[in-house]
Amino acid sequence: MDVPEDIFTEPDQIDPDTLSNLGPLRHLAGIWEGVAGQDVNPKADGPERRVFSERIELQPIDPQTNGPQLLYGLRYHTHINAPDEQNTFHDQIGYWLWEPATGLIMQTLAIPRGQVALAIGHAEADARRIVVEANRGTSSYGICSSEFLEQAFRTDRYRMEIEIHDDGSWSYTEDTILMVRGRAEPFVHKDSNRLTKIAEPNPNPWFQISTGKGGQ
């Protein structure tokens, strides 16, 4: 990445309408559900395969600046349940971010088991396929885990691929490469699902104020 000499001055004009400046992330904005998720995770006596249902909400945030860098994004919350359990199977929060000037895409993620990550990818504004990756041990676009996870289920690599479908739905596949203590070979923890929209997104706060439009 080329960092300009002036790292402080922000852009002169910023469009407050996030939904119009999300590039390929615009397809993800809204509230979604999927009932045919597939999960493959490690257990003591071999891989366990589970099905799950998922609800994910992705709402636009106000434009963000790092000096001259301008980002538009979505704040998300994913909640997953398995059909045979009442408690939460997986919970995750974070942001999807898009830099129109470069095509940079970033996904931040945090899960309540002591792990965070920042994944990176690039795509054209009209792309219908998004891929982001993060790797352990890097100071940018990396993975940070609790001491227990580092020693017992070390995450070395994370990759997420999203495909936007003609009917407006989208699907994803996630591969998380784990080194499980006591195992010689890495384990590929897989998740996949297809999501259908159940509600439209709300306009971001600044856009609501500037236009007098309220949320849905």
Image (spheres, grey):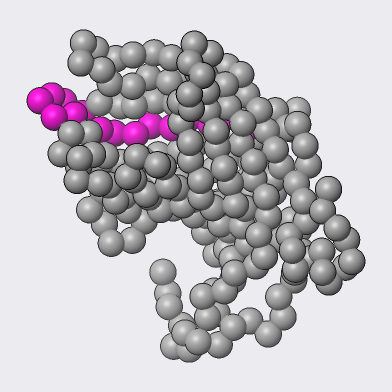
Q: Is residue 124 visible to us here?
A: no
> Which one is nearer the viewer's eye here, 215 or 171?
215
Quarter-of-image position of residue 57: top right
Q: Is residue 42 above or below residue 65?
A: above
> Which one is nearer the viewer's eye here, 48 or 8?
48
Residue 170: in magenta span: yes
Q: Which residue is at 52% across, 80% downward?
A: 67
Q: Which residue is at 30% across, 41% downward?
A: 157
Q: Is residue 145 visible to us here?
A: yes
Position of residue 153 measured from the top left corner of the image (x, y, whole percent) = 22, 34
Q: Is residue 16 above or below residue 176?
A: below
Residue 142: in magenta span: no
Q: Main secondary structure of the magenta part?
A: strand
Q: Which residue is at 24% across, 12% downward?
A: 46
Q: Is residue 76 above or below residue 89?
A: below
Give left or right: position of 172 versus 21: left
Give left or right: position of 181 versus 193: left
Position of residue 40 measured from the top left corner of the image (x, y, whole percent) = 37, 19
**Quadrant placement of the N terminus:** bottom left
> Which one is nearer the viewer's eye here, 117 or 84?
84
Labels in figure, total = 0
Give left or right: position of 8 versus 46: right
Q: Which residue is at 61% across, 36% downward?
A: 56
> Which one is nearer the viewer's eye here, 92 or 104?
92
Position of residue 38 measured from the top left corner of the image (x, y, whole percent) = 48, 18
- The magenta stretch is 169-186
Position of residue 100 measured from the top left corner of the image (x, y, whole percent) = 62, 63
